[in-house]
Image: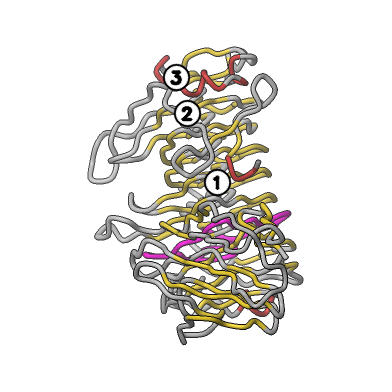
Amino acid sequence: MSLSCFSQPVSFQFIAKALISLFLVFGLLGCNESDDSEDGGGSNTPITYTVSFYELFDLHLAKRVSVEPNTAIELIAGSKTTWYKGGSDTPLSGEYNVTGNINFYGVKDVIEISDQAGLASIACGGSKRYILINDIALSGNWTPLCSAVGGGYFNGLLQGDFHKITGLNVVWNADRGPSGLFGWLDYPAQIHNLGVIGAHVEGAYNVGIIAGTIFDDAGYTMGVSLTNSYATGTVIATPPGKHDNESTYAGGIVGVKQFLCGAIKGVYFNGSVKASGRGSGIGSAGGIAGSGHATDSYSAGSVVGDYAGGIAGYGSANRCYSTANVNGIGIAGGIVAQGRSSEYNVDRDVAINQAISGATVGRIAGKDAIPCDRWNCANTLVPNIALDSLVPVGSIGSTSLAGENKTQEELKQQKTYEDIGWKFGANNDNPWNIDEGSSYPYLYWQK
């Protein structure tokens, strides 16, 4: 029998008592070392499990413990916690003899999702908690969850547990309805550790593979959290032609992240993104977000739009990089097309793009933010770095939009990134890894 902690098995043949502390802060998982002692091997001595987690917004989900049949266990609650069986609100404690494969959680009413029907039943509103317990293959055309205007936002927790969703195919042209696996996410929604592979998502206005729109009410200080997730595939935003002037936003992960709260952190995208406008409207395309902010993330593939950026079409980024081919009909930048933020800057980013082209271009940003108003302030565009051989095609802005030159060899060295504030390690505070001399950085959970 084994217990997996981030897919690292711990054998109980040599352990009499395994103590595992499991916690989740903003949906982030972790495990502590277990106590080592002699195992009774099939005896009646119960195996002890302890669960604890930091309580915030009552939306946290401890890493589940899967127990094999006919095993005597003892469940011990940690601070502010107890144990629950999946889907149950009845707490468990003391000795418990498992008669089947059962998942235990540190919060109540966790809804397990194992197939397409379960995924489609995710509720809008109600702050419910869901977890994928296996990979899911979708078929047919997917209707975005919580996408109908006025139909409610998803404000619960979806823990992907590093499982993958394949076969996501969305053709959704409802007027003003955002398109993706989810339509709308709103505070205090959390999506963590989710992969969506080989997706094809088309829609009008706000289009992204994981979510069309993240709506963070500016009155909250925490907002929506989308972390440690990834997507591959194709994203297309096309105006439906119902108005004279229409703008669209397309991103590999999210179409639009509104306002300044919350986080898109530790994500990556590989694929193609395209956005187009109608009349005087623009199509804003980004490898991560059509409009929004991302941290500790990267993109690859291609990005095409009136405004096109390797990370965001219209937005900001910190400690991000892109290798994408970026083509902006109007404005193009290796990281963002045009800066937009009143708090975040476009800084500590790295442009390693295959190519950048447009009417107005820059290796980091095609254009700085518009003059300050309530939501828009000029960005700090240093420190940033870029591949020395990267020469954008188009009218190049000021040198502040270019980044400091680095060679291909330097861009495969950890020190290059540490010098501009990147953190390397094995957790969400130190999220980057690198194969020294042979790779660009990647996220620790990809190891």
Relative image position of residue 97 (x, y in whole percent): 62, 83
Q: Name the residue under label 2.
A: 349
Amino acid at pointer 1:
Val
Q: Mark 3 points at which residue?
A: 419
The answer to whether mark 2 and mark 1 are in CB contact below 8 A is no
Q: Residue at position x 44%, y 71% from top?
A: 153
Q: Can residue 248 be seen in this view?
A: no
Relative image position of residue 318 (x, y in whole percent): 43, 35
Please rate how many residues cluster around mark 1, counting C-alpha atoms within 10 Å: few if below 14, some from 14 to 19, many from 20. Answer: many
Magenta region: which residues?
Answer: 178-205
Amino acid at pointer 2:
Asp
Task: Indicate the quadrant containing the N terminus: top left, top right, bottom left or bottom right.
Answer: bottom right
Relative image position of residue 376 (x, y in whole percent): 29, 40
Please rate how many residues cluster around mark 2, counting C-alpha atoms within 10 Å: few if below 14, some from 14 to 19, many from 20. Answer: many
Task: Indicate the quadrant containing the C terminus: top left, top right, bottom left or bottom right.
Answer: top right
Q: Can residue 118 be seen in this view?
A: yes
- Judged by its main secondary structure, the magenta piece is strand
Disc on the earlier residue, 3 or 1: 1
Q: Does the magenta stretch include residue 289?
A: no
Q: Vertical placement of 377 versus 395: above or below?
A: below
Camera-side mark, 2 or 3: 3
Amino acid at pointer 3:
Asp
Numbered mark located on residue 267 in the image:
1
The Cα–Cα distance between marks 2 and 1, rounded to whole angstroms, is 15 Å
Q: Tag 1, which secondary structure?
A: loop
The structure's colour scheme is: secondary structure
Judging depth in this view, the residue of 211 and 157 nearest the camera is 157
**Residue 91 appears left or right of 54:** right
Q: Is residue 197 magenta?
A: yes
Disc on the earlier residue, 2 or 3: 2
Q: Tag 3, which secondary structure?
A: loop
